[in-house]
Image (spheres, rainbow, N blue to C red):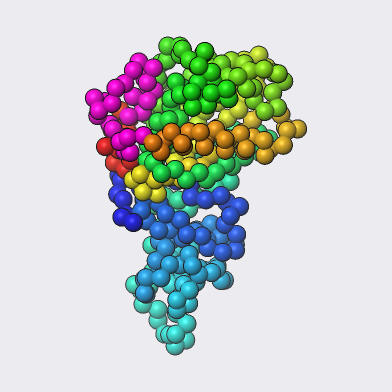
Amino acid sequence: MVRLHDPVLENDWHAMCLASELTDKPIGVTLLGERVVLFRTEQGVHALRDLCVHRGAMLSKGWVKNGTVVCPYHGWQYDKDGSCVCIPAQPKGERIPPRAKATPYFCEEKYGFIWVCLGEPAGGVPHFEEFADPSYRPLPCGPYTVRAAGTRVIENFTDFAHLMFVHQDLLGHPDYAELPEIKVIKEKDRIYIENIPIFQPVAHSGSDKQDGTTYIYRKEVYRALSGRLSKTDPGNGQTLWIMISATPVADDECQVFMVVSRNYGFDVDDENFIRFQDIVFDQDARVIETQKPELLPLDLQAELNHRVDIFSVAYRRWLGEMGVVVGTA
């Protein structure tokens, strides 16, 4: 796989796996074409380039020992900073070569995921109270493998007009396809829309409504490949929050991670919310994977845009302004 370079995405945080999956064994993942090994020690979670500098074996095929990840080929041990601290075949007391080092990456555990940044992040993984506070019952969902650019996934997230057709009888209905006037608000680090009423035939799981209702949406894209939404029943204040992050594996492939939180229905089995999200995103992925061109066109003349696409158009413009390369054309 070709290593991809992007001035924005390399310095951003990307969800790589469920935190619950990273136990006593290392895990191999791919980010922007780069193989990365994740491992957990008493000091926390760590990420290194998945490559032993000795003979190029994958560290993720090894094991964790005494706070290090061990290469399965010759037993070389690398600590959390990537320094080789043990070469078994070398006489004891002999100095380990300074070049015996694996490339370390920034790594953080948050919202039930392990996050990695290949470059230099401006700060930690962004904090959102609705996904950090356990009283809102945050539920990690995914990962979902999508054979499409992460940019296509996030643009789909910005789009309301597909709800009545891709998610017919769940999140929308063709009889209620007309959309209100939408205003995009742009700030330094995000673009968002709010107060968008959408009729949904199926109420939230755990809702006190028997039939569908009109929910008020707010959607925000706060990173090139990350966004969040809230949908609220104005009659009772019941709110569902969703965070989405599309991790670019390659130019035209991504892994999608989500977190779902709520302020109601705590007597309802959490699995109901996860299962519903699985169904909805599978419907999205089936369409996204058919889109041509595979990469998101930043030239606004390349595809026909309608006035209802105002948020999607704003997203494309924002990507261009930031200089995002991967997943765009």
Part of the protein shown in magenta: 291-316
Residue furthest toward the bottom? Answer: 91
Q: Nearer the viewer, residue 24 or 175?
A: 175
As drawn, 121 above or below 288 = below
* 167 drawn magenta: no
Image point (36%, 74%), residue name: 55
Q: Residue 43: name its quadrant.
A: bottom right
Was residue 304 drawn as part of the magenta stretch in this picture? yes
Which residue is painted at 28% across and 32% down in the image?
Answer: 297
Residue 77, visible in the rendered structure: no
Q: Is residue 2 left or right of residue 161?
A: left
284 and 226: which is toward the camera: 284
Residue placed at 39% from the left, 23% from the top? 311
Residue 103 at x, y percent in the picture: 38, 62
Count of marks, rendered view: 0
Dividing the picture into quarters, in which one does residue 325 lie? top left
